[in-house]
Image (cartoon, rainbow, N blue to C red):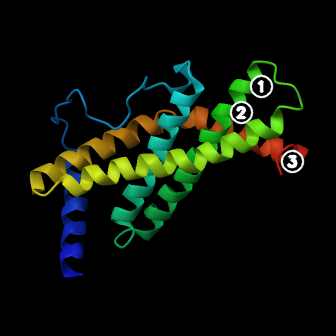
Amino acid sequence: MPAMKSLTYQLIAIVISIWVSPTIANTENDSFITENEVFLAIENPNREADMRAVCSSSLDIFNMIIAEERPAQAKQLHQLSNGSSIAIAMSIVADKLENDMNAKEFPSVWKFAQIQMESLRDTQSTMILSDLEMMTENSQQEQFMTKLIKTIEICSSNNESQQMYIDMWREMVKSGMLK
């Protein structure tokens, strides 16, 4: 456990140095986001859902890293991750609503969206955590944290559209459409 605590302190120091340092160079793969950084501009709803899953997973992973040292911030990250999860499902539903889905189709679309919400998060979490497992040296861990933080920054820049999806979901729950 002392090794884990030491790693936690190292990661927190890395995070702080990354936020403070304006000289960190961007590389081609400087985040886990692989599509357009403006998620609503992604034409394929499945790719948009993928990117929202990257956000949800990244937020939860960062939450795990800082949970012991900063429990309130970790809880906030977890709540943001939950919002990203809702946005995964709602990006799929919204696409179908825009394309004049009939009432008979909605239950199957909602079921598919819920499955995607779970499976995409699991897939993205596994991919991101496998990257972390391969990082053995401090410099590699710093590179991972830089990539994770850049990802979270991109996700944060999409919070407005995420909130739009959350509001849409709330309205659908209130109307009785979602059971």
Can residue 163 be seen here? The reply is: yes
Query: Neighbour class for label 2 at 10 Å: few (<14), some, many (≥20)?
Result: many
Quadrant in which residue 91 is drawn: top right
Q: Are marks 1 and 3 in contact (CB under 8 Å)?
A: no
Query: Neighbour class for label 1 at 10 Å: few (<14), some, many (≥20)?
Result: few
Question: Which tag, 3 or 2, sits closer to the chain's start?
Answer: 2
Q: Locate residue 50, reporting x and y percent.
A: 50, 36
Q: Label 1 vs label 3: CA separation?
A: 17 Å
Nearer-the-camera pick, 14 or 172: 172
Q: Locate residue 149, reporting x and y percent.
A: 32, 45
Can residue 83 be seen here? The reply is: no
Q: Residue, x 32% and y 39% (percent of image)?
A: 150
Query: What kind of element bears circle 2?
Result: helix
Q: Residue lying farthest bottom?
A: 1
In the displayed structure, 179 sits above or below 40; it is: below
Q: Give the quarter of the figure containing the N terminus.
A: bottom left
Q: Locate residue 138, reporting x and y percent.
A: 11, 56
Query: What kind of element bears circle 3?
Result: helix
Nearer-the-camera pick, 112 or 61: 112
Residue matched to label 3 = 174
Q: Residue, x 39% and y 43% (percent of image)?
A: 152
In the displayed structure, 58 sits above or below 13; it is: above
Query: Neighbour class for label 3 at 10 Å: few (<14), some, many (≥20)?
Result: few
The answer to whether residue 63 is left or right of residue 114 is left
Q: Identify residue type, mark 3.
A: Lys
> Mark 3, mark 2: which one is toward the viewer?
2
Q: Identify residue type, mark 2.
A: Val
Q: Label 2 vs label 1: CA separation?
A: 6 Å
Q: Residue, x 56% and y 24% (percent of image)?
A: 40
**Which mark, by number, is residue 93?**
2
Question: Which tag, 1 or 3, sits closer to the chain's start?
Answer: 1
